[in-house]
Image (cartoon, rainbow, N blue to C red):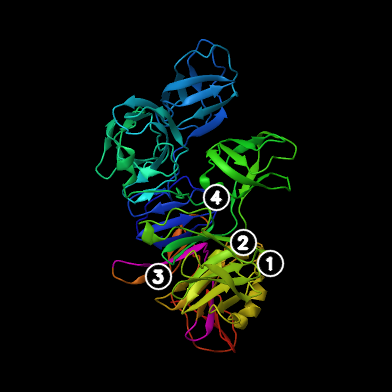
Amino acid sequence: MALAVIKSGQNANNLYDFAVMNYTLYMVNGIDRNQAYAGDSCRNMGLDAPKTLRTGFTTGGATASAGTTVVLDTAASTTNNAYKGGIITIDGIVRIITSYVGSTRTATVNAAWGAVKAEGTAYTIIQHCVATNGTSGLIDGGTYGIKITFYDQDHDIESNASAVVTATSVAASGKITLTFLPHPVGQSNVTHWKIYRTLASGTTYYLDQPASAENCTIESNSLVKIDSWAGDESVVLSLTDDSLSVLSAYNGTFENNTFLTAPFIEAGKNRVFMAGPVRYNTGTVQVANGSTSVLGVGTEFASGNIGLDFVIADNYYAYEVSTVESDTRLTLASAYAETSAPAGSVYAIVNNCNTVVFSEKVGNALYPESINRTGNWVLAEPGDNDEITGLQRIGDDDFIIFKKNHQYRLQGTDEDNFDAPGFLANEGAAGNWGIENVDGYIVYNTPDAGIHRTTGSGMPENISAAIENFLANDTIAETRNKYAFLKFFKRERELWCALTAYGSTTNDLVYVWKPDIGQWFKYTGIYINCMEEVTDSNGLRQLYTGDAHGWVWKQDSGTNDGVPGGTVKGRITGVSSSTSTSTSTTSSTSTSTSTTTSTTTTGA
Protein backbone atom coordinates (compact mmCIF):
# COMPACT_ATOMS: atom_id res chain seq x y z
CA MET A 1 0.00 0.00 0.00
CA ALA A 2 1.44 3.38 -0.99
CA LEU A 3 0.86 6.41 1.23
CA ALA A 4 0.94 10.03 0.06
CA VAL A 5 1.36 13.17 2.14
CA ILE A 6 -1.50 15.58 1.48
CA LYS A 7 -0.67 18.09 4.25
CA SER A 8 2.37 18.65 6.43
CA GLY A 9 3.23 21.11 9.18
CA GLN A 10 0.12 20.34 11.25
CA ASN A 11 0.08 19.97 15.02
CA ALA A 12 1.22 16.41 15.72
CA ASN A 13 -0.23 16.22 19.22
CA ASN A 14 -3.93 16.50 18.35
CA LEU A 15 -6.46 14.01 17.06
CA TYR A 16 -8.24 14.68 13.77
CA ASP A 17 -11.87 14.33 12.86
CA PHE A 18 -13.10 14.01 9.26
CA ALA A 19 -16.25 14.55 7.20
CA VAL A 20 -16.93 14.10 3.49
CA MET A 21 -19.26 16.20 1.34
CA ASN A 22 -19.28 16.92 -2.40
CA TYR A 23 -16.25 14.67 -2.96
CA THR A 24 -14.25 16.80 -0.54
CA LEU A 25 -12.63 15.60 2.68
CA TYR A 26 -12.78 18.10 5.54
CA MET A 27 -10.23 17.72 8.35
CA VAL A 28 -10.25 19.39 11.77
CA ASN A 29 -8.23 18.99 14.96
CA GLY A 30 -9.26 21.93 17.14
CA ILE A 31 -5.91 23.70 16.89
CA ASP A 32 -4.77 24.14 13.29
CA ARG A 33 -6.72 25.85 10.55
CA ASN A 34 -9.49 23.57 9.21
CA GLN A 35 -8.38 21.85 6.00
CA ALA A 36 -10.15 20.68 2.81
CA TYR A 37 -8.85 18.04 0.38
CA ALA A 38 -10.54 17.33 -2.97
CA GLY A 39 -8.07 14.79 -4.33
CA ASP A 40 -5.63 17.27 -5.87
CA SER A 41 -4.25 19.49 -3.13
CA CYS A 42 -4.93 20.39 0.48
CA ARG A 43 -6.12 23.93 1.22
CA ASN A 44 -7.55 25.98 4.04
CA MET A 45 -11.28 25.54 4.53
CA GLY A 46 -12.94 28.75 3.42
CA LEU A 47 -11.29 32.03 2.47
CA ASP A 48 -10.11 34.84 4.72
CA ALA A 49 -11.29 38.32 3.77
CA PRO A 50 -8.80 40.74 2.20
CA LYS A 51 -6.66 42.04 5.04
CA THR A 52 -6.97 45.79 5.48
CA LEU A 53 -4.71 46.26 8.50
CA ARG A 54 -1.81 44.42 10.09
CA THR A 55 0.25 45.28 13.13
CA GLY A 56 3.54 44.05 14.52
CA PHE A 57 6.97 44.98 15.83
CA THR A 58 10.00 45.80 13.71
CA THR A 59 12.94 43.39 13.60
CA GLY A 60 16.35 43.36 11.94
CA GLY A 61 17.94 46.07 14.07
CA ALA A 62 17.36 49.81 14.27
CA THR A 63 15.84 51.69 11.35
CA ALA A 64 18.22 54.36 10.05
CA SER A 65 16.97 57.96 9.94
CA ALA A 66 18.13 58.36 6.35
CA GLY A 67 16.98 54.90 5.33
CA THR A 68 13.87 53.94 3.38
CA THR A 69 13.54 50.31 4.51
CA VAL A 70 12.11 48.49 7.49
CA VAL A 71 12.09 44.79 8.42
CA LEU A 72 8.70 43.51 9.54
CA ASP A 73 8.06 40.91 12.25
CA THR A 74 8.65 37.19 11.71
CA ALA A 75 4.92 36.54 11.15
CA ALA A 76 4.80 38.88 8.13
CA SER A 77 4.13 37.51 4.65
CA THR A 78 6.88 35.81 2.67
CA THR A 79 5.21 36.78 -0.63
CA ASN A 80 6.94 39.48 -2.66
CA ASN A 81 5.03 42.79 -2.85
CA ALA A 82 2.35 41.48 -0.47
CA TYR A 83 2.19 44.93 1.19
CA LYS A 84 3.00 47.08 -1.83
CA GLY A 85 0.83 50.21 -1.78
CA GLY A 86 0.16 49.83 1.93
CA ILE A 87 0.40 52.80 4.27
CA ILE A 88 2.81 52.06 7.13
CA THR A 89 2.94 54.10 10.33
CA ILE A 90 5.79 53.98 12.90
CA ASP A 91 5.72 56.37 15.86
CA GLY A 92 3.45 58.74 13.96
CA ILE A 93 5.60 58.78 10.82
CA VAL A 94 3.54 57.74 7.78
CA ARG A 95 5.03 56.30 4.61
CA ILE A 96 3.81 54.35 1.55
CA ILE A 97 5.35 50.94 0.86
CA THR A 98 6.69 50.94 -2.69
CA SER A 99 8.05 47.37 -2.70
CA TYR A 100 8.32 44.38 -0.39
CA VAL A 101 10.76 41.43 -0.40
CA GLY A 102 9.11 38.42 1.19
CA SER A 103 12.25 36.35 1.80
CA THR A 104 13.71 39.03 4.10
CA ARG A 105 10.39 40.65 5.14
CA THR A 106 11.85 44.00 4.08
CA ALA A 107 9.59 46.86 3.05
CA THR A 108 10.89 49.84 1.09
CA VAL A 109 9.00 53.12 1.56
CA ASN A 110 8.64 56.27 -0.50
CA ALA A 111 10.72 58.57 1.73
CA ALA A 112 13.38 58.43 4.44
CA TRP A 113 12.20 57.83 8.00
CA GLY A 114 13.87 60.96 9.29
CA ALA A 115 14.57 59.45 12.73
CA VAL A 116 16.15 56.31 14.17
CA LYS A 117 13.58 53.67 15.18
CA ALA A 118 14.78 50.95 17.54
CA GLU A 119 14.17 47.30 16.82
CA GLY A 120 10.92 46.19 18.39
CA THR A 121 9.06 49.42 17.59
CA ALA A 122 5.36 48.89 16.90
CA TYR A 123 4.05 49.51 13.39
CA THR A 124 0.71 49.39 11.58
CA ILE A 125 0.04 48.86 7.89
CA ILE A 126 -3.22 49.90 6.27
CA GLN A 127 -3.34 47.48 3.40
CA HIS A 128 -6.40 48.15 1.31
CA CYS A 129 -6.47 49.53 -2.17
CA VAL A 130 -6.52 53.26 -2.88
CA ALA A 131 -9.47 54.95 -4.60
CA THR A 132 -8.81 57.99 -6.77
CA ASN A 133 -11.26 60.05 -8.81
CA GLY A 134 -11.20 60.58 -12.54
CA THR A 135 -13.43 61.86 -15.34
CA SER A 136 -15.76 60.40 -17.98
CA GLY A 137 -17.85 57.68 -16.43
CA LEU A 138 -20.22 57.85 -13.45
CA ILE A 139 -23.41 59.72 -14.09
CA ASP A 140 -23.86 60.88 -10.48
CA GLY A 141 -21.42 62.72 -8.31
CA GLY A 142 -21.06 61.92 -4.61
CA THR A 143 -19.45 59.48 -2.23
CA TYR A 144 -19.19 55.77 -3.05
CA GLY A 145 -18.45 52.81 -0.76
CA ILE A 146 -16.40 49.96 -2.20
CA LYS A 147 -15.75 46.49 -0.81
CA ILE A 148 -13.56 43.72 -2.22
CA THR A 149 -13.77 39.95 -1.78
CA PHE A 150 -11.53 37.05 -2.80
CA TYR A 151 -13.03 34.31 -4.97
CA ASP A 152 -11.92 30.73 -5.65
CA GLN A 153 -13.55 29.90 -8.96
CA ASP A 154 -12.45 26.24 -8.92
CA HIS A 155 -14.40 25.57 -5.70
CA ASP A 156 -17.03 28.34 -5.90
CA ILE A 157 -15.93 29.86 -2.57
CA GLU A 158 -16.08 33.58 -1.81
CA SER A 159 -14.50 35.31 1.17
CA ASN A 160 -16.07 37.89 3.39
CA ALA A 161 -15.61 41.49 2.27
CA SER A 162 -12.80 43.88 3.05
CA ALA A 163 -13.31 47.00 5.07
CA VAL A 164 -14.92 49.82 3.12
CA VAL A 165 -12.74 51.70 0.66
CA THR A 166 -14.27 55.14 0.23
CA ALA A 167 -14.21 57.20 -2.92
CA THR A 168 -15.28 60.74 -2.02
CA SER A 169 -16.23 63.85 -3.96
CA VAL A 170 -16.49 62.05 -7.26
CA ALA A 171 -17.56 64.60 -9.82
CA ALA A 172 -20.65 64.07 -11.94
CA SER A 173 -19.77 61.99 -15.01
CA GLY A 174 -16.59 60.90 -13.24
CA LYS A 175 -15.00 57.51 -12.59
CA ILE A 176 -13.11 55.71 -9.81
CA THR A 177 -9.69 54.08 -10.14
CA LEU A 178 -8.74 51.40 -7.60
CA THR A 179 -5.03 50.70 -7.29
CA PHE A 180 -3.04 48.22 -5.17
CA LEU A 181 -5.79 45.60 -5.03
CA PRO A 182 -5.17 43.44 -1.92
CA HIS A 183 -3.27 40.17 -2.24
CA PRO A 184 -4.60 36.85 -0.85
CA VAL A 185 -1.53 36.15 1.26
CA GLY A 186 -1.27 32.44 2.06
CA GLN A 187 -4.35 31.57 -0.03
CA SER A 188 -2.97 30.24 -3.30
CA ASN A 189 -6.37 28.89 -4.38
CA VAL A 190 -7.77 32.42 -4.83
CA THR A 191 -8.29 33.07 -8.55
CA HIS A 192 -10.27 36.33 -8.70
CA TRP A 193 -11.39 39.50 -7.00
CA LYS A 194 -15.02 40.59 -6.80
CA ILE A 195 -15.58 44.33 -6.43
CA TYR A 196 -18.80 45.64 -4.89
CA ARG A 197 -19.92 49.29 -5.00
CA THR A 198 -22.78 51.34 -3.64
CA LEU A 199 -24.77 53.91 -5.55
CA ALA A 200 -23.83 57.52 -4.91
CA SER A 201 -24.18 58.17 -1.15
CA GLY A 202 -25.86 54.76 -0.83
CA THR A 203 -25.45 51.87 1.62
CA THR A 204 -26.46 48.86 -0.50
CA TYR A 205 -23.65 47.06 -2.35
CA TYR A 206 -23.86 45.70 -5.91
CA LEU A 207 -21.34 43.59 -7.80
CA ASP A 208 -19.63 46.05 -10.12
CA GLN A 209 -18.39 45.41 -13.65
CA PRO A 210 -15.06 47.25 -14.00
CA ALA A 211 -14.48 49.06 -17.29
CA SER A 212 -10.74 48.45 -17.62
CA ALA A 213 -7.81 46.96 -15.72
CA GLU A 214 -4.02 46.86 -15.51
CA ASN A 215 -2.04 43.71 -14.59
CA CYS A 216 -5.31 41.76 -14.18
CA THR A 217 -8.16 40.68 -16.47
CA ILE A 218 -11.85 41.61 -16.39
CA GLU A 219 -14.06 38.66 -17.30
CA SER A 220 -17.61 38.77 -18.66
CA ASN A 221 -19.14 37.61 -15.35
CA SER A 222 -17.81 40.67 -13.49
CA LEU A 223 -14.90 38.69 -12.04
CA VAL A 224 -11.47 40.27 -12.03
CA LYS A 225 -8.93 37.53 -12.71
CA ILE A 226 -5.60 37.60 -10.89
CA ASP A 227 -2.90 37.25 -13.55
CA SER A 228 0.24 37.75 -11.46
CA TRP A 229 1.44 39.16 -8.17
CA ALA A 230 3.11 42.32 -9.39
CA GLY A 231 1.60 44.29 -6.53
CA ASP A 232 0.24 47.13 -8.63
CA GLU A 233 -2.98 45.71 -10.07
CA SER A 234 -5.69 48.32 -10.70
CA VAL A 235 -9.20 48.61 -12.13
CA VAL A 236 -11.43 51.47 -13.24
CA LEU A 237 -15.08 51.66 -12.17
CA SER A 238 -17.36 53.74 -14.39
CA LEU A 239 -20.81 52.10 -14.52
CA THR A 240 -23.62 54.57 -14.05
CA ASP A 241 -25.83 54.18 -10.99
CA ASP A 242 -28.74 53.17 -13.22
CA SER A 243 -26.70 50.41 -14.84
CA LEU A 244 -25.28 49.23 -11.51
CA SER A 245 -28.62 49.02 -9.71
CA VAL A 246 -30.13 46.51 -12.17
CA LEU A 247 -27.27 44.00 -11.89
CA SER A 248 -28.56 40.71 -10.53
CA ALA A 249 -25.37 39.71 -8.75
CA TYR A 250 -26.08 41.54 -5.53
CA ASN A 251 -24.58 40.75 -2.11
CA GLY A 252 -25.94 42.78 0.75
CA THR A 253 -24.78 40.86 3.82
CA PHE A 254 -21.17 39.74 3.33
CA GLU A 255 -21.50 36.89 5.82
CA ASN A 256 -18.96 34.50 4.25
CA ASN A 257 -17.05 34.09 7.49
CA THR A 258 -14.56 31.27 7.94
CA PHE A 259 -15.09 28.63 10.61
CA LEU A 260 -13.03 28.94 13.73
CA THR A 261 -11.08 25.73 14.22
CA ALA A 262 -13.06 22.99 15.96
CA PRO A 263 -12.24 19.45 17.14
CA PHE A 264 -15.38 17.68 15.82
CA ILE A 265 -17.04 17.75 12.39
CA GLU A 266 -19.98 15.91 10.78
CA ALA A 267 -21.77 16.24 7.42
CA GLY A 268 -25.55 16.24 7.09
CA LYS A 269 -28.60 18.34 6.23
CA ASN A 270 -26.65 19.61 3.16
CA ARG A 271 -24.16 21.29 5.50
CA VAL A 272 -21.20 20.58 7.69
CA PHE A 273 -21.57 20.89 11.46
CA MET A 274 -18.75 21.56 13.92
CA ALA A 275 -18.70 21.35 17.69
CA GLY A 276 -16.51 20.94 20.73
CA PRO A 277 -14.48 23.22 22.96
CA VAL A 278 -12.14 25.45 20.98
CA ARG A 279 -8.99 26.93 22.40
CA TYR A 280 -7.00 29.10 20.00
CA ASN A 281 -3.71 30.47 21.33
CA THR A 282 -1.23 30.81 18.48
CA GLY A 283 1.36 33.56 19.06
CA THR A 284 1.38 36.08 21.91
CA VAL A 285 -0.44 39.34 22.66
CA GLN A 286 -0.38 42.56 24.60
CA VAL A 287 -3.31 44.62 25.92
CA ALA A 288 -3.34 47.62 28.26
CA ASN A 289 -5.63 48.19 31.21
CA GLY A 290 -8.58 50.31 30.08
CA SER A 291 -8.05 49.51 26.39
CA THR A 292 -10.16 47.46 23.99
CA SER A 293 -7.31 46.96 21.50
CA VAL A 294 -5.37 43.67 21.49
CA LEU A 295 -2.09 43.57 19.55
CA GLY A 296 -0.67 40.18 18.57
CA VAL A 297 2.63 38.83 17.31
CA GLY A 298 2.59 35.56 15.40
CA THR A 299 -1.19 35.41 15.72
CA GLU A 300 -3.71 34.59 13.01
CA PHE A 301 -6.89 36.24 14.22
CA ALA A 302 -9.79 35.66 11.83
CA SER A 303 -13.39 36.75 11.48
CA GLY A 304 -14.43 33.48 13.08
CA ASN A 305 -13.07 34.79 16.39
CA ILE A 306 -15.85 37.39 16.63
CA GLY A 307 -18.22 36.64 19.48
CA LEU A 308 -15.81 34.30 21.26
CA ASP A 309 -14.15 34.89 24.63
CA PHE A 310 -10.65 36.35 24.97
CA VAL A 311 -8.68 35.54 28.12
CA ILE A 312 -5.15 36.18 29.34
CA ALA A 313 -3.41 33.15 30.86
CA ASP A 314 -4.02 32.70 34.60
CA ASN A 315 -6.75 35.37 34.50
CA TYR A 316 -10.28 34.35 35.39
CA TYR A 317 -12.13 37.06 33.46
CA ALA A 318 -13.11 36.70 29.80
CA TYR A 319 -13.83 39.48 27.28
CA GLU A 320 -15.92 39.09 24.15
CA VAL A 321 -14.18 39.69 20.81
CA SER A 322 -16.07 42.49 19.04
CA THR A 323 -14.16 42.92 15.76
CA VAL A 324 -11.06 41.54 14.03
CA GLU A 325 -9.09 44.13 12.09
CA SER A 326 -6.27 41.86 10.94
CA ASP A 327 -4.44 38.64 11.75
CA THR A 328 -2.55 40.52 14.47
CA ARG A 329 -5.14 42.96 15.81
CA LEU A 330 -8.60 42.60 17.35
CA THR A 331 -10.96 44.73 19.43
CA LEU A 332 -12.77 43.68 22.61
CA ALA A 333 -16.42 44.53 23.26
CA SER A 334 -15.49 46.13 26.61
CA ALA A 335 -12.37 47.71 28.05
CA TYR A 336 -9.80 45.36 29.56
CA ALA A 337 -10.13 45.92 33.32
CA GLU A 338 -7.28 43.72 34.55
CA THR A 339 -3.62 44.54 35.03
CA SER A 340 -2.00 45.36 31.68
CA ALA A 341 -0.68 42.31 29.85
CA PRO A 342 2.74 43.18 28.39
CA ALA A 343 4.08 42.09 25.00
CA GLY A 344 4.64 38.35 24.90
CA SER A 345 1.67 37.47 27.09
CA VAL A 346 0.06 34.05 26.69
CA TYR A 347 -3.65 34.16 25.87
CA ALA A 348 -6.53 32.05 24.58
CA ILE A 349 -9.67 32.58 22.53
CA VAL A 350 -12.32 30.06 23.56
CA ASN A 351 -15.85 29.29 22.44
CA ASN A 352 -18.90 28.31 24.40
CA CYS A 353 -18.45 24.59 25.08
CA ASN A 354 -22.17 24.02 24.42
CA THR A 355 -22.32 25.42 20.88
CA VAL A 356 -22.78 23.57 17.58
CA VAL A 357 -22.09 25.73 14.49
CA PHE A 358 -23.09 24.93 10.93
CA SER A 359 -22.16 26.06 7.44
CA GLU A 360 -24.26 27.75 4.82
CA LYS A 361 -26.39 25.25 2.88
CA VAL A 362 -24.71 23.43 0.00
CA GLY A 363 -27.64 24.38 -2.23
CA ASN A 364 -26.51 28.02 -1.91
CA ALA A 365 -22.84 27.23 -2.57
CA LEU A 366 -20.91 24.35 -4.08
CA TYR A 367 -18.75 23.90 -1.01
CA PRO A 368 -20.04 24.30 2.59
CA GLU A 369 -17.12 26.34 3.85
CA SER A 370 -18.55 29.62 5.10
CA ILE A 371 -20.64 30.51 8.12
CA ASN A 372 -22.99 33.33 9.03
CA ARG A 373 -21.67 34.21 12.48
CA THR A 374 -24.89 35.96 13.47
CA GLY A 375 -27.19 32.96 13.15
CA ASN A 376 -25.53 29.67 12.23
CA TRP A 377 -25.32 28.08 15.66
CA VAL A 378 -27.32 25.96 18.10
CA LEU A 379 -26.94 25.83 21.88
CA ALA A 380 -27.11 22.40 23.52
CA GLU A 381 -28.44 23.02 27.03
CA PRO A 382 -25.76 25.38 28.37
CA GLY A 383 -27.19 25.14 31.88
CA ASP A 384 -26.14 21.53 32.47
CA ASN A 385 -22.56 22.51 33.49
CA ASP A 386 -21.17 20.09 30.93
CA GLU A 387 -19.23 20.36 27.66
CA ILE A 388 -19.55 18.71 24.25
CA THR A 389 -17.29 15.68 23.77
CA GLY A 390 -18.57 14.36 20.45
CA LEU A 391 -20.96 14.72 17.52
CA GLN A 392 -22.43 11.80 15.56
CA ARG A 393 -24.99 11.60 12.77
CA ILE A 394 -27.91 9.20 13.30
CA GLY A 395 -30.71 8.16 10.97
CA ASP A 396 -31.32 10.14 7.83
CA ASP A 397 -30.30 13.58 9.02
CA ASP A 398 -30.26 14.08 12.78
CA PHE A 399 -27.29 14.24 15.13
CA ILE A 400 -26.58 13.08 18.66
CA ILE A 401 -24.67 15.72 20.62
CA PHE A 402 -22.62 13.94 23.26
CA LYS A 403 -21.34 15.61 26.40
CA LYS A 404 -19.37 14.04 29.21
CA ASN A 405 -22.50 13.28 31.23
CA HIS A 406 -25.43 14.04 28.90
CA GLN A 407 -26.64 13.48 25.35
CA TYR A 408 -29.06 15.47 23.20
CA ARG A 409 -30.59 15.09 19.75
CA LEU A 410 -30.16 17.93 17.25
CA GLN A 411 -33.29 18.14 15.09
CA GLY A 412 -34.74 20.33 12.37
CA THR A 413 -34.47 20.85 8.64
CA ASP A 414 -33.05 24.36 8.32
CA GLU A 415 -31.46 27.16 10.32
CA ASP A 416 -34.90 28.53 11.14
CA ASN A 417 -35.84 25.42 13.14
CA PHE A 418 -32.57 23.71 14.12
CA ASP A 419 -32.79 22.92 17.81
CA ALA A 420 -31.30 20.55 20.36
CA PRO A 421 -34.03 20.13 22.98
CA GLY A 422 -34.09 16.35 22.67
CA PHE A 423 -32.61 15.29 26.01
CA LEU A 424 -31.82 11.56 25.85
CA ALA A 425 -29.95 10.52 28.98
CA ASN A 426 -27.78 11.57 31.92
CA GLU A 427 -24.96 9.66 30.32
CA GLY A 428 -22.37 10.79 27.84
CA ALA A 429 -19.36 9.79 25.78
CA ALA A 430 -15.75 10.03 26.90
CA GLY A 431 -14.55 11.30 23.54
CA ASN A 432 -15.51 11.81 19.90
CA TRP A 433 -13.34 8.97 18.57
CA GLY A 434 -15.06 6.45 20.83
CA ILE A 435 -18.40 6.88 19.01
CA GLU A 436 -19.51 4.72 16.04
CA ASN A 437 -22.59 3.81 14.00
CA VAL A 438 -23.48 0.09 14.14
CA ASP A 439 -26.67 -1.24 12.51
CA GLY A 440 -28.77 1.84 13.24
CA TYR A 441 -27.40 2.27 16.75
CA ILE A 442 -24.77 4.69 17.97
CA VAL A 443 -22.26 2.81 20.10
CA TYR A 444 -20.04 4.84 22.41
CA ASN A 445 -17.43 4.55 25.13
CA THR A 446 -18.60 6.07 28.42
CA PRO A 447 -16.34 8.06 30.78
CA ASP A 448 -16.21 5.04 33.13
CA ALA A 449 -14.98 2.71 30.33
CA GLY A 450 -18.28 1.01 29.53
CA ILE A 451 -19.48 0.34 25.95
CA HIS A 452 -23.13 1.42 25.49
CA ARG A 453 -25.46 1.97 22.53
CA THR A 454 -28.50 4.12 21.76
CA THR A 455 -31.06 4.45 18.99
CA GLY A 456 -31.38 8.17 19.62
CA SER A 457 -34.57 7.70 21.61
CA GLY A 458 -35.19 5.96 24.88
CA MET A 459 -32.58 4.85 27.42
CA PRO A 460 -29.15 3.60 26.29
CA GLU A 461 -28.22 -0.08 26.57
CA ASN A 462 -25.04 -1.45 28.16
CA ILE A 463 -23.52 -3.97 25.72
CA SER A 464 -20.28 -4.50 27.65
CA ALA A 465 -21.79 -6.17 30.73
CA ALA A 466 -20.40 -9.56 29.62
CA ILE A 467 -16.83 -8.32 29.80
CA GLU A 468 -16.95 -6.12 32.86
CA ASN A 469 -14.69 -8.58 34.70
CA PHE A 470 -12.15 -8.34 31.89
CA LEU A 471 -12.35 -4.56 31.89
CA ALA A 472 -11.87 -4.56 35.65
CA ASN A 473 -8.89 -6.92 35.45
CA ASP A 474 -7.29 -4.79 32.75
CA THR A 475 -7.83 -1.72 34.95
CA ILE A 476 -8.75 0.55 32.04
CA ALA A 477 -7.18 4.01 32.31
CA GLU A 478 -10.29 6.16 32.62
CA THR A 479 -8.23 9.35 32.31
CA ARG A 480 -7.41 8.28 28.73
CA ASN A 481 -10.93 7.26 27.78
CA LYS A 482 -11.27 10.33 25.58
CA TYR A 483 -8.65 8.72 23.31
CA ALA A 484 -10.55 5.41 22.97
CA PHE A 485 -11.28 4.56 19.32
CA LEU A 486 -14.28 2.54 18.05
CA LYS A 487 -14.69 1.30 14.47
CA PHE A 488 -17.24 -1.07 12.91
CA PHE A 489 -15.47 -3.44 10.48
CA LYS A 490 -18.43 -4.06 8.17
CA ARG A 491 -16.84 -6.87 6.16
CA GLU A 492 -16.40 -9.04 9.23
CA ARG A 493 -19.28 -7.40 11.12
CA GLU A 494 -17.04 -6.64 14.08
CA LEU A 495 -16.93 -3.61 16.34
CA TRP A 496 -13.30 -2.92 17.26
CA CYS A 497 -12.76 -1.02 20.53
CA ALA A 498 -9.23 0.22 21.26
CA LEU A 499 -8.67 1.17 24.91
CA THR A 500 -5.75 2.07 27.17
CA ALA A 501 -4.59 -0.10 30.04
CA TYR A 502 -3.74 1.57 33.34
CA GLY A 503 -0.22 3.00 33.31
CA SER A 504 0.01 3.02 29.50
CA THR A 505 0.15 6.08 27.27
CA THR A 506 -1.35 4.49 24.16
CA ASN A 507 -4.32 2.29 23.22
CA ASP A 508 -2.89 -1.19 23.85
CA LEU A 509 -6.07 -3.19 24.54
CA VAL A 510 -8.46 -4.24 21.78
CA TYR A 511 -11.91 -5.67 22.48
CA VAL A 512 -13.90 -6.87 19.46
CA TRP A 513 -17.67 -7.35 19.61
CA LYS A 514 -19.61 -9.48 17.12
CA PRO A 515 -23.20 -8.18 17.32
CA ASP A 516 -24.62 -11.12 15.33
CA ILE A 517 -23.64 -13.59 18.06
CA GLY A 518 -23.46 -11.20 21.01
CA GLN A 519 -19.90 -12.24 21.78
CA TRP A 520 -16.75 -10.33 22.70
CA PHE A 521 -13.11 -11.15 21.86
CA LYS A 522 -9.98 -9.66 23.35
CA TYR A 523 -6.82 -9.06 21.30
CA THR A 524 -3.52 -8.25 22.97
CA GLY A 525 -0.26 -6.88 21.64
CA ILE A 526 -1.98 -4.59 19.15
CA TYR A 527 -1.58 -0.81 19.41
CA ILE A 528 -4.36 1.25 17.80
CA ASN A 529 -4.72 5.02 17.99
CA CYS A 530 -6.94 5.30 14.91
CA MET A 531 -8.81 3.04 12.47
CA GLU A 532 -10.55 3.26 9.13
CA GLU A 533 -12.28 0.81 6.80
CA VAL A 534 -11.24 1.23 3.16
CA THR A 535 -12.55 -0.46 0.01
CA ASP A 536 -9.63 -1.77 -2.06
CA SER A 537 -9.32 -2.01 -5.84
CA ASN A 538 -11.05 -5.40 -5.78
CA GLY A 539 -14.08 -3.98 -3.98
CA LEU A 540 -13.14 -5.72 -0.72
CA ARG A 541 -13.43 -3.81 2.56
CA GLN A 542 -10.15 -3.70 4.51
CA LEU A 543 -9.48 -2.44 8.03
CA TYR A 544 -6.39 -0.28 8.52
CA THR A 545 -5.13 0.86 11.91
CA GLY A 546 -2.49 3.40 12.93
CA ASP A 547 -0.31 3.41 16.03
CA ALA A 548 1.42 6.12 18.04
CA HIS A 549 4.70 5.61 16.15
CA GLY A 550 3.40 6.51 12.70
CA TRP A 551 2.92 2.93 11.44
CA VAL A 552 -0.18 1.85 9.50
CA TRP A 553 -1.30 -1.78 9.72
CA LYS A 554 -3.66 -3.83 7.55
CA GLN A 555 -5.67 -5.89 10.03
CA ASP A 556 -6.89 -9.46 9.84
CA SER A 557 -4.09 -10.29 7.41
CA GLY A 558 -0.90 -12.29 7.81
CA THR A 559 0.43 -13.89 10.99
CA ASN A 560 1.55 -10.90 13.00
CA ASP A 561 1.58 -7.16 13.29
CA GLY A 562 5.32 -7.01 13.66
CA VAL A 563 7.49 -3.94 13.71
CA PRO A 564 10.76 -3.92 11.70
CA GLY A 565 13.02 -6.56 13.20
CA GLY A 566 10.33 -9.23 13.27
CA THR A 567 8.95 -8.68 16.76
CA VAL A 568 5.51 -10.27 16.98
CA LYS A 569 3.05 -7.66 18.21
CA GLY A 570 -0.19 -9.66 18.07
CA ARG A 571 -1.90 -12.37 16.09
CA ILE A 572 -5.36 -11.52 14.73
CA THR A 573 -5.96 -13.94 11.88
CA GLY A 574 -9.10 -15.56 13.26
CA VAL A 575 -11.13 -16.43 16.34
CA SER A 576 -13.30 -19.33 17.39
CA SER A 577 -16.91 -19.01 18.41
CA SER A 578 -16.83 -22.28 20.36
CA THR A 579 -17.56 -22.21 24.07
CA SER A 580 -15.74 -23.91 26.91
CA THR A 581 -14.61 -23.22 30.40
CA SER A 582 -12.11 -20.43 30.83
CA THR A 583 -8.53 -21.50 30.18
CA SER A 584 -5.24 -19.83 29.46
CA THR A 585 -2.67 -20.47 26.77
CA THR A 586 0.71 -19.04 25.94
CA SER A 587 0.29 -19.37 22.19
CA SER A 588 -2.90 -17.37 21.96
CA THR A 589 -3.23 -13.65 21.48
CA SER A 590 -7.01 -13.47 21.33
CA THR A 591 -9.62 -14.19 23.96
CA SER A 592 -13.39 -14.38 23.54
CA THR A 593 -16.25 -14.15 25.99
CA SER A 594 -20.02 -14.38 25.80
CA THR A 595 -22.77 -13.61 28.23
CA THR A 596 -22.35 -16.98 29.96
CA THR A 597 -18.91 -18.36 29.12
CA SER A 598 -15.42 -17.24 28.35
CA THR A 599 -13.09 -18.95 25.91
CA THR A 600 -9.56 -18.69 24.69
CA THR A 601 -8.72 -19.17 21.04
CA THR A 602 -5.61 -19.55 18.97
CA GLY A 603 -5.04 -17.52 15.86
CA ALA A 604 -4.30 -19.21 12.57
- Residue extending farthest to the top is 66
Q: CA distance from mark 1 to mark 2?
A: 9 Å
* The N terminus, quarter of image: bottom left
Whichever of callouts 1 and 3 sits on the residue coming sooner in the sequence is 1
Residue 572 appears in the picture as rendered: no
Say above or below: 314 vs 127.
below
Identify the amino acid type marked 1: Asp
Q: CA distance from mark 4 to mark 1?
A: 26 Å
Q: Is residue 63 left or right of residue 501?
A: left
Whichever of callouts 2 and 4 sits on the residue coming sooner in the sequence is 4
Q: CA distance from mark 3 to mark 2?
A: 42 Å
Q: What residue is disc 2 on?
A: 354
Circle 3: element type = loop
Whether tag 4 and tag 1 are in contact, CB under 8 A, the answer is no
Q: What residue is disc 4 on?
A: 31
Whichever of callouts 1 and 2 sits on the residue coming sooner in the sequence is 2
The magenta stretch is: 515-537
Whichever of callouts 3 and 4 sits on the residue coming sooner in the sequence is 4
Q: What residue is disc 3 on?
A: 557
Q: From the viewer's perspective, is the residue at label 2 or at label 4 nearer?
A: 2
Q: CA distance from mark 2 to mark 4?
A: 18 Å
